[in-house]
Image (cartoon, rainbow, N blue to C red):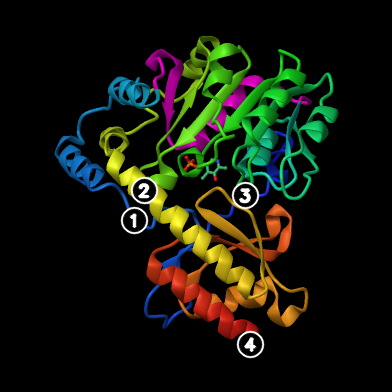
């Protein structure tokens, strides 16, 4: 007999996710939050308007199947809405997939610097997380395939990955899929797909459409709706069916549904966000390199910046220095980068401010 309720074995081994900080030390006049890959242009004005309107009807339950939202997503991406499930952030879908397809003792694979929530959901399902080495801070298809065992049930691939910002061309993703047994689910987490402008990149829509064991997850968070919590997956009908049995019946709230519909229709806001990102990501990479800092080549809306090995100019000291000036970046020690910071692309003011502050920091 235990003296109090006991979580299932393994639950207390989970290291809880640590979100990006949003506050600066006391006394800092202006805070620039660059720690959570939010959109520096904010939400679409049309999404703000839609959220205001829905506020007067918050007494009414949302449509549990989010049908109009799925239809709008389907229109925008050329997908059958029946193959779409919406969720409370894409994190929710990732968790549901782990809960549904993993049994205790099963294995799920991801790469060594992969987005941290995969490990959490795998452990929460009682399964075994298998972290595979990357090559040059990028997923390595051969290493992933070499890690597959008869117990493997899921491979999570963040493409592009957070916090590295690197991506696999679609040919490599196809090669990965071709090497997996049909019983293994390949989860393509395309949280940053809108920001990628590479001819050899695809989020995975065709792979999903042509196979029974691939799903693609997407999010509205990185385009201005992080606070609304809205994500979705495109998946074969059998997987849609399983997820719909397990998810909360009203997992997507009314505000998220209306803001999401308005946001996806505001193509101009998406285009402006992507253009801003491209301009400032290029500028920042160049400036950091001029300062002697290595930057991992990123196709996302953030950069992974590596600091000198001497402690005085290391990532921890840089983080303190920047925080005191109101620039909140992300420590990524838990992702295997003790001496790097991840910086979300910010407003012009924030971007210029970080570069000036780091120039001073490195001179000191
Ligand atoms: C931000 C992010 C997500 C999901 O975020 P939600 O806000 O839950 O939709 C998923 N995967 C990666 C790699 C991310 O960086």
Residue segment shown in magenta: 78-106
Front-lying residue, 234 or 296: 296
Task: Kindly identify which residue carries mark 1.
Answer: 41
**Residue at 74% across, 55% down:** 336
Q: Which of the image's four quarters has the N terminus?
A: top right
Task: Kindly identify which residue carries mark 2.
Answer: 224
Task: Kindly identify which residue carries mark 4.
Answer: 363
Query: Gap between marks 3 and 1, in whole Å?
Result: 30 Å
Tag 2–tag 1 contact (CB < 8 Å): yes
4 or 2: tag closer to the N-terminus: 2
Where residue 55 appears, as percent x and y from the top left, is 18, 41
Where residue 11 appears, as percent x and y from the top left, is 68, 39
Q: Is residue 251 magenta?
A: no
Query: Gap between marks 4 and 3, in whole Å?
Result: 37 Å
**Image quadrant where residue 206 sits:** top right
Q: Is mark 3 within 8 Å of ligand 1?
A: no
């Amino acid at each position: 007999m235990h003296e109090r309720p006991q979580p299932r074995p393994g639950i207390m081994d989970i290291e809880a996710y640590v979100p990006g900080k949003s506050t600066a030390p006391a006394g800092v006049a202006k805070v620039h939050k660059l720690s959570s890959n939010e959109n520096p242009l904010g939400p679409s004005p049309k999404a703000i308007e839609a959220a205001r309107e829905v506020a007067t009807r918050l007494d009414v339950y949302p449509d549990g199947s989010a049908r109009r939202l799925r239809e709008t997503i389907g229109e925008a991406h050329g997908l059958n809405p029946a193959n779409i499930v919406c969720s409370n952030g894409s994190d929710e879908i990732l968790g549901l997939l782990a809960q549904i397809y993993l049994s205790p003792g099963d294995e799920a694979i991801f790469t060594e610097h992969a987005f941290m929530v995969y490990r959490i959901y795998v452990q929460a399902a009682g399964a075994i997380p298998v972290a595979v080495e990357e090559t040059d801070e990028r997923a390595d298809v051969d290493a992933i395939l070499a890690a597959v065992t008869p117990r493997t049930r899921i491979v999570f691939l963040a493409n592009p990955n957070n916090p590295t910002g690197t991506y696999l061309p679609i040919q490599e993703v196809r090669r990965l899929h071709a090497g997996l047994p049909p019983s293994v689910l390949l989860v393509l987490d395309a949280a940053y797909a809108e920001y990628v402008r590479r001819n050899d990149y695809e989020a995975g829509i065709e792979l999903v459409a042509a196979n029974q064991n691939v799903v693609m997850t997407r999010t509205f968070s990185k385009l201005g709706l992080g606070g609304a919590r809205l994500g979705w997956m495109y998946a074969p009908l059998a997987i849609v069916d399983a997820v719909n049995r397990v998810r909360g019946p009203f997992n997507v709230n009314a505000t998220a549904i209306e803001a999401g519909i308005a946001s996806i229709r505001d193509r101009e806001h998406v285009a402006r966000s992507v253009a801003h990102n491209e301009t400032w990501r290029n500028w920042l990479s160049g400036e950091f390199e001029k300062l002697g800092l290595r930057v991992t080549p990123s196709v996302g809306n953030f950069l992974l910046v590596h600091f000198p090995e001497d402690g005085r100019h290391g990532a921890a000291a840089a983080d303190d220095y920047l925080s005191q000036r109101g620039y909140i970046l992300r420590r990524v020690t838990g992702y295997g980068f003790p001496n790097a910071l991840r910086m979300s692309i910010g407003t012009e003011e924030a971007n210029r401010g970080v570069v000036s502050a780091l120039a001073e920091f490195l001179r000191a």
